[in-house]
Image (tube, grey):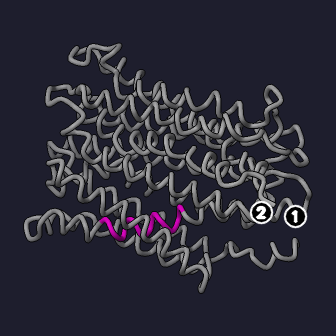
Amino acid sequence: MARLGRAGRIAYGVGRFGSTLMLSLVDLTSFYIYGSMFELNWFLSGLALGVSYVVIGLTHWLTGFYSDRASIWGHGRKPFVIIGAPALATTGALLFMPDLFLTLSSPLVEPYLFAYYLMTLATFKAAYAFLLTAFQAWMPEITDEDERPLVSGYQNTANWSANAIGAALAFIAPPLLFTSTSPAVLTATGKTVVALAALSVIGSYLPSVLLLPAGTRGQRPGHDILSETATIVHNPDYARWVFIAALFALPFSGVIAQAVGFTEEVLGLTTIEDLAFPAAVLLGATVAFLFGWARVIRSSTKKKTLTVATLVLACALFIMPLVPTLVPLLPGRVVAAVFFVPIGAGIAAFYLLNYVVPADFAELDTLRSGVGRAGMFIGLLGIPFNAAQAVGAVLLGAIMGWSEATTGSTAQGLVIWGPLFAPFLLVAVLVLQRTEIDLGDDLATGS
């Protein structure tokens, strides 16, 4: 019998809305806004972004372990949510408002602006990992096997709704949310949008905190985090999946950080109406393929599905330098549609399976050992994934700085990163062929 009921499932499912909205807004805009609108050196902007990925990776790992073992105030993982949601909301809002503390027009502001961006972005990412790792590990403690797909359905509805709003805001952020001054600052509309996004983080987690039980714990893992880490990476297929995820993270960091700049400077789409179109295409393609790939997996395998999607994404990145040649021949919206659809297809397949595959490995480990290590299986994945994104961010900063120094603009940097990062996807495909991620038979037998 279900332990939550419909109201409880909705209360838990809507939690992801606010945090996803804020993360989407930050990930899609902060690198470009600090480098272009706040006029921070591009390399320093990339360096701050890179450090933040290291912070979020370590926080995922540590939170996964300690939330498996700890029961703060006797309420299981719920205190992690109570602490994490306000922290995420506050740091996310402050990240967009350095002018509250700094005079951005000062010629001496750059080191202070870098320190501010680094501090707010790193604490934002730490708060996100602290909140989400514990929140996701809470689900199996308050639901039973039959109702989890329903809970996941509510979560995905909230998640993709927030992504839609966040992507739309990100693409229209430069003309709508910031002034045209140099350097730019948030307009009154921009401050309102950021404040509402921050409040949505707290508001969306309130139902779960107020209405849901702390849950029931299973057998806890040992007290040595290194020993527990060694236990889960002893599974060679899981270890290879962690490496595959890291290889995906490099090009993903480019897609996320460069989407807005690519749309404006390469495709020439600068009005709010024009910017809304590629945002809708990218989001629509991602959502459509998310459900499309899920259907394909039922008649095929996870490995074959991810292989095809990854090759599609790699091809799109390889041809990025050719995109500017299409702009004079075709309307920018048409070029955006042609380009962002395969990008969305590749992103969707990985995001779909990066939730499913680690959960399968965790369940199989529990069946074999009797120990619940879901937090560790989810949290450990964050270290190499975010470390690779950190490397990608630093490389992007260097590429953008090189482009600006050699050509006088960032347009070249916005396309040349694609073929430089695409080979990592090809390596991921090769490793994937040696990795068993279709575990249905093993899960059925528990062996």
Q: Is residue 193 above or below residue 274?
A: above
Spatial CA distance of label 2 from label 1 is: 14 Å
Determine which residue is flagged by label 1: 367
The quarter of the rendered structure image containing the N terminus is bottom right
Q: Is residue 317 above or below residue 29?
A: below
Question: Residue 90: where, in percent of width, then height?
Answer: 48, 25
Q: Is residue 199 magenta?
A: no
Q: Quadrant of residue 172?
A: top left
Question: Residue 333: where, in percent of width, then height?
Answer: 18, 64
Q: Name the dominant secondary structure of the magenta segment.
A: helix
Residue in the foreground of this view, choosing between 334 and 320: 334
Determine which residue is flagged by label 2: 145
Q: 10 Å neighbourhood of mark 2: few (<14), some, or many (≥20)?
A: few
Image point 75% across, 63% down: which residue? 361
Residue in the foreground of this view, choosing between 1 and 129: 1
Image point 57% across, 51% down: which residue? 385
> Could you tell which of marks 2 and 1 lies nearer the N-terminus?
2
Q: Is residue 308 above or below residue 128?
A: below
The quarter of the rendered structure image containing the C terminus is bottom right
Question: Residue 370: where, in percent of width, then height?
Answer: 91, 57
**Front label number (2 vs 1):** 2
